[in-house]
Image (tube, rainbow, N blue to C red):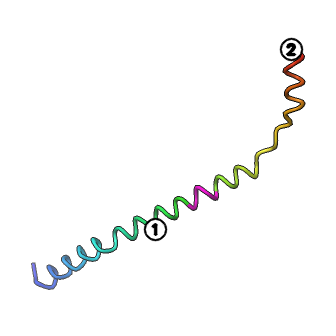
């Protein structure tokens, strides 16, 4: 193993250790944004329930 390869491995390990928390935080933010967008889309697709007709139908039984 040459010294250049050892230096490359050590530098790569240091870079991964330095940037891994930032990458993880960025992924959490993207996942959270995706959940919010998905929830908003589901809320837009729901039809409102007419509670007065639902109560009338349930009261007749």
Image mark for residue 49: none
* Sequence-wise first label, 2 or 1: 1
User: In which quarter of the view is residue 37 placed?
Assistant: bottom right
Rendered location of residue 54, percent (x, y): 85, 28
Q: Residue at horizontal 82%, vertical 42%?
A: 48
**What is the spatial separation of the Cα atoms under label 2 and label 1, in whole angstroms?**
55 Å
> For the magenta stretch, what is the residue range?
33-37
In the rendered image, residue 49 lying in the magenta stretch gets the answer no
Q: Is residue 43 left or right of residue 38?
A: right
| Image quadrant occupied by the C terminus | top right
| Image quadrant occupied by the N terminus | bottom left
Residue lying at the far bottom of the rendered structure:
4
Image mark for residue 26: 1
Pick whichever, 33 or 52, lies toward us: 52
Q: Residue at horizontal 23%, vertical 73%?
A: 13
Whether residue 41 is situated above or below residue 25 in the rendered picture: above
Q: Identify residue for label 2.
A: 61
Pick whichever, 29 or 45, lies toward us: 29
> Which of pointers 2 and 1 indicates the residue nearer the eye?
2
Tag 2 and tag 1, C-beta contact below 8 Å = no
Q: Is residue 38 left or right of residue 32?
A: right
């Amino acid at each position: 193993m040459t010294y250049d390869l050892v230096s490359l491995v050590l530098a790569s390990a240091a870079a991964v250790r330095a940037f891994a928390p930032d990458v993880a935080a960025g992924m959490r933010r993207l996942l959270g944004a995706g959940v919010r967008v998905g929830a908003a889309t589901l809320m837009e697709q729901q039809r409102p329930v007419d509670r007065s007709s639902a109560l009338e139908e349930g009261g007749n039984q």
